[in-house]
Amino acid sequence: MDKNFFITTPIYYPSGKPHMGHAYSSIIADFFARFKKIDGFDVLFLTGTDEHGLKIQRAAEKEGVKPQTLCDQISETFRDLSKILNLSNNDFIRTTEIRHKKSVQYLWNELVKNDEIYLSKYSGWYSVSDEAFYNEDEIEEVDGKKIAISSKSPVEWIEEESYFFKLSKWEKPLLDYYENNPDFISPGSRKNEVISFVKSGLKDLSVSRKTFSWGIPVPNNQSHVIYVWLDALTNYLSALNYPNTKNDLFKKFWPASLHLIGKDILRFHAVYWPAFLLASKIELPNKVFGHGWILSGEEKMSKSKGNILDPIEIIKEYGLDPLRYYLIKEVSFGNDGNISQERLENCINSDLANNYGNLCQRVTAFTNKNCDGKIPLEIKFQEDDLLILNKYKDNLDKIRSKIDDQNINFYIDYIVNSLFEANKYFNDQEPWKQKGNKIRLNTIVYTTLEIVRKISFLLYPIIPESALKALKIFNIDENDVKLNTISNNEYLTKGNNLNKIDILFKKKDKNND
Ligand code: MSP
């Protein structure tokens, strides 16, 4: 079985500072990366910044700096954010890096060699904010201004000499590909949108611009720069050292397992990207998942709308893991969602502090008092104990397959139910009434500690720092977190001392704030 997993986030425009929408894509990708890692996969997790194009050039002009200076500054804030979010990415790519430019120009030449590109003239609507071309039927007029219907971004008319990619000829092969690979575009509702877009007829795509210079020059015609989306999408290959397809990275990790993106950029990933790859005879990625938006009120959060939420502010106030937990649990994956202070505080108080934190505290305090602070030596499982313990083993394959379907909602529900069940088990078993029956008391304690371990392993991809803090009780560190061990009901070494546990989550007391 292929135990390699290559996951990507979109690469972010460094035209403004990172916001909650960017943090969302990255946190979700990190969740999958960490899950696969503890499930024994060799994981490559890629993120980065998309630095060319008119949008960036104009942002730099507005700031009165060179585009490269702006990119250097803002790209750094995205890199910082990836650390603040505790992302486990192995690479951070910038499209202004030489390794990337070389790949893009090589890919361009491949397209030329395969007779996929021709020179002509473009005239039509263009949105700089989306870096996208729009057909007449995709725009509308509001207050005398033309805007794109889907994104509401202003569009401008452009007319210039341009190279075109023969997208139209890939209409049928793309439709065949979607049909033969039903999981390629997810979720299903979005797949239908893409299919109807392709069925409505694909026009050749303008893939170079001549009226500005901030981009990768077209080889052999330096008066053109390569269209920023052809440039940006290629990052997924350039990070693997394309065109050197014989190197280990490429051999191991291409085709990508999962391109995780926002629904706003599905067309680029599910239509243009596979068409570019088909035309250059490169294998297609396994899956593109378009997640929903983080809304501010009813609208998509974005810099141009001036309604952004700063993830760093929220992290300062509530901590990183509560934010990660909130985004994963409270934004139904695939749909839009928003940040509500009340629901965030609820997550902290009820799920994290009461259900998880309290379980850890209670069982360790009880062990300290009644088992000399050691993992009990003598135990004898009864039916009740095995019933709750074996569930983890019995559900492991189901959990794996739900994750392969990106069913995060199942995963988090499973954890919430398990926490509830674990607390109930400890209450119902009443170990404090078993002081005369040492073996029974030991067994209840051991079972509960085992459950704390198993749940902490499952929580690790969501709240890595807190889960590891809890696992310190057992001296378990990050390298020991292996998913398949949750099938083992006697993983914890009997007789070992428990370490002291730090408070995992501080409750948010509304009256004290
Ligand atoms: N640079 C392109 C992507 C190129 S990928 C080859 C781009 N950049 S972006 O910075 O505008 O947005 C990148 C991604 O951030 C979006 O696709 C989406 O995944 C995420 N989000 C941006 N705003 C968002 C929300 N308000 N909500 C959720 N995610 C959103 O597009």
Image: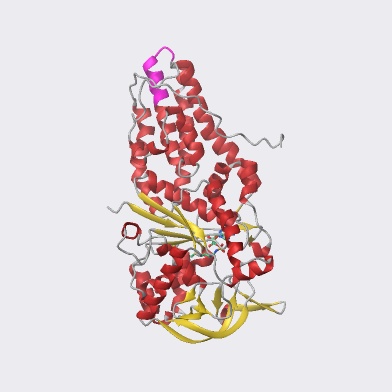
Is the residue 268 above or below the residue 507 in the image?
A: below
Q: Is residue 348 highlighted in magenta? A: no
**Which sits in the foreground, 480 or 414?**
480
Looking at the image, residue 114 lies above or below residue 365: below
Foreground residue, 265 or 74?
74
The x and y percentages for residue 397 are 34, 46
- Answer with left or right where residue 308 lies relative to residue 165: right
The C terminus is located in which quarter? top right
- How many marks on residues? 0
Which is more toward the observer, 228 or 347? 228
Based on the picture, tell me whether residue 441 belongs to the magenta stretch.
yes
Q: In the figure, is residue 268 to the left or right of 257?
A: right
Extent of the magenta region: 435-446
Question: Which residue shows up at 34% across the image and 69% down it?
Answer: 282
At 31% from the left and 51% from the top, the residue drawn is: 3
Residue 193 in view (yes/no): no
Q: Position of residue 340 (x, y in %)?
A: 64, 49
Residue 99, quarter of picture? bottom left
